[in-house]
Image (cartoon, rainbow, N blue to C red):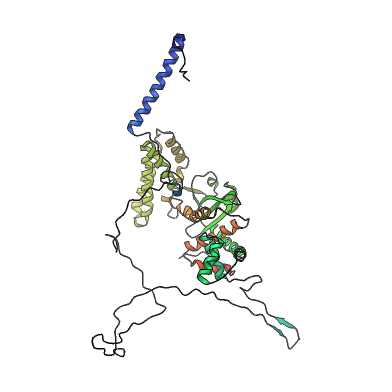
Amino acid sequence: MLDKNVDLEELNKEQLIDLVKLLLARVSTLDKRVARQKKGVEKTVKKTSQNSSLPPSQDQKANRSPKDKAKRGAKQGHVGKSRQRVKPDEIVEFRVLECKECGQGLSQRMQWLVGRRQVTDLPLARPIVREGHRYQVTCPSCRCQQTSTYGQGYEKGRMFGSNLEQVVLYLHYAHPLSYGRVQRILSDLYGLKISRGALVNVVKRAKEHLKRGADAIHRQLMQSSVIGSDETTARVDGLKYWQWVFQTPQLAYHVIRPSREAQVLRDVMGDVQPEVWVSDVLSSQMCHPANSYQICLAHQVRDLQYEIDTHHCQWAKQIQTLFYDAMTLHRQRDDLDPDIFKPQRQDYETRLDQILDIAPHYVDSERLRARFVKHRDALLLFLHRDDVPPTNNASEQALRNSVIYRKVTGGFRSEWAPDLYADLISILETARRQQRPIFESLASILDGQSVFDTAHFS
């Protein structure tokens, strides 16, 4: 450290030489920094969702420039779309009653159809109250009294039917509305007065039914050859938990655990060993049980973008371009002849090896290169298997509503709520992926019926 108060006249020759060397080194460092600043290379770059793994919610939103009012109809070069006509439930005929010129009655004259216009509406909402009666009879042969039992849907303590229960669950969890707002909606739409305690009991009563539905999804997931996984934070009674998702194009299974460690993978997967695991490079995800692994390229291109923004790193630009081109080839594979696709795939493999042989000039770029070298076989696996996606976007999308739920509600306050929520979201997301009617699927599960015990493909 240079002392500003040092008396140069009191220094000997050796001390003066050391001081000059120190000053020359500092001048050289400052010259290099100024040169980089002049070239615009060294600049402050903030991490965003476009160049890192930060969520879009943390981006600063710029003011949007005013746009011209869009014209009606399809854009140039696009096929126009309109609402499709469906089979009507009711037909209202508007016939000509009389001539507007002379007043002659025309209602009995033959008329021909010249136009149709469909209007879709909702029926008036009105709750249905069903009352079950039990009966008793005396057997004329043995004089024993026989009493009937209440059937399904009239269990002891049950006050509301499955249709009402699934609406409560859907509003409270899928569209994170408080019990108070659910009360208001049921009152305004249906004229139905339900206490908050009754709503809580509805949710609690559904717990075992939802667990059986989620367990069926879990069993189906264990038979899948390619599984994607991701995790996000959750709040349980003021503590930080983690919500994990394990998914395929047809299934989504959620669990909420107090840990982000690999033990969660072992608890969920057990002894099952899928063929391919798709995730990011989190250390716990790297303990996956699969034979092969596909790294999420969406995360990698964002990390590379930060290097491009910060240092204008050409190495990062080259490998990012290769990843984008490879993902484009993946999307086009169904339209390409195998004799064309295979040489292109081999070309990407060769180009990737050539780029990884180059040592970049920046520390962060070298860190990315070390990651890619370590996971070399997991970078382009999707070009060798058409059932493997190049990104883990499907897992992130499966967690998106849960992130919104966490932000709106602040988390869970009871011990049983996290498991119930994970089971319900598993059912809703799986129903969406299989294009099943969500309300019908949920109502069937609440009635104790099996919905996801067999694989379903639309």
Residue 68 percent location from the top left of the image: 29, 56
Tell which residue pokes out farthest to the left in this image.
101
Residue at the location (36% across, 73% down)?
A: 85
Quadrant of the rendered structure where residue 76 is? bottom left
- Is residue 178 something one can see in this rendering? yes
Residue at the location (56% across, 62% down)?
A: 180
Residue at the location (45% across, 14% down)?
A: 18
Residue 325 percent location from the top left of the image: 36, 47
Quadrant of the rendered structure where residue 104 is? bottom left
> In terms of depth relative to the viewer, which is nearer, 157 or 142?
157
The total number of labels drawn is 0
Residue 421 percent location from the top left of the image: 57, 58
> In terms of depth relative to the viewer, which is nearer, 77 or 122?
122
In the image, taking residue 138 as reference, residue 253 lies left or right, namely left
In the image, taking residue 154 as reference, residue 174 lies left or right, namely left
- Is residue 451 something one can see in this rendering? no
From the image, which quarter does the C terminus lie in? bottom left
Residue at the location (38% across, 52% down)?
A: 330
Q: Is 295 located above or below residue 335 in the figure?
A: above
In the image, taking residue 76 as reference, residue 270 lies left or right, namely right
> In terms of depth relative to the viewer, which is nearer, 75 or 196?
196
Residue 285 percent location from the top left of the image: 53, 47
Q: Is 280 located above or below residue 147 in the figure?
A: above
> In terms of depth relative to the viewer, which is nearer, 375 or 178?
178
